[in-house]
Image: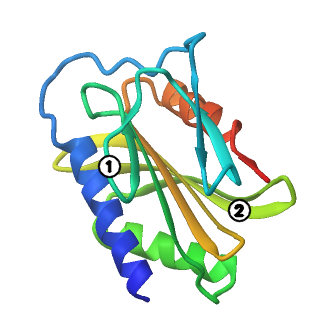
Amino acid sequence: MRNWVKFAGISLLMMTCAACDDSDSDTAAIESHAHNQTISLLNGKLSFLLPAEMTNQGGNMHVYADASGKKTVLVIMGSAIKEDLAVLAQRMVALQRSRDPQLQIVGSKTITINGHPLWQLDSIISIKGQRSWSSIVLGKIDDNLLTMQITQPIGDQKQAQIDAENIISTITIQ
């Protein structure tokens, strides 16, 4: 339960950071770059591609962000929890709804990557009037609980969804 609380706090921090900028600047979606970077965690067990402009901003957690801090990918590897993935997914939705009464769930589904069942929640989150796209991937890898949240401002919802899906589609699990 302690890991779940830690995740909840970190997730809230990321949602808050994504919505903190009150500027009216154009929030163009992440552009496709020929120079993506491969991120490898858990001694190579988990890997995925991120746009080149996103760098790790965290210490124990892996927090990748662009220079503006508006586009973020948060990866937390915690101790495994005995609950089934469906139970964890229900808790995640309840947690998101408790933080954001305006939460708009766009999709919730089970995905399989290299034989590993994962759960994906796509939603539009709102904090302080700022709307952001959020894709959360949740699953168990060996003795670790994987939580990956991709958050970016919504300028063009379809493009934000495509950009998040482009990152998710590169996840590999050994």
Give the structural element (helix, strand or loop) at label 2. Answer: strand
Location of residue 81 by image quarter: bottom right
Q: Is residue 174 left or right of residue 158?
A: right
Which label lies toward us, 2 or 1? 1
For residue 33, what is the image quadrant? top right
Query: How many numbered discs sit on the rendered protein?
Result: 2
Which residue is drawn at the image coordinates 36% and 51% (left, top)? Answer: 125
Type of residue at label 2? Leu
Q: Which mark is residue 118?
A: 2
Give the class, few, some or many, for how many residues have Cα within 10 Å of label 2's Cα (few <14, many ≥20). Answer: many
State the image coordinates of residue 111 (x, y, percent, origin top left): 76, 56
Residue reaching furthest left? 22
Q: Quadrant of the N terminus?
A: bottom left
Q: What distance separates the C-alpha of mark 2 from that of mark 1?
A: 24 Å
Residue 101 seen from this side: no
Q: Amino acid at mark 1?
A: Gly
Relative image position of residue 77 (x, y in whole percent): 52, 65
Where does the image place residue 108, in percent across and percent down from the top left?
63, 59
Tag 1's secondary structure? loop
Relative to 25, is 71 above or below?
Answer: below
- Residue 141 vs residue 117, the one in the foreground: 141
Q: Which residue is mark 1?
A: 58
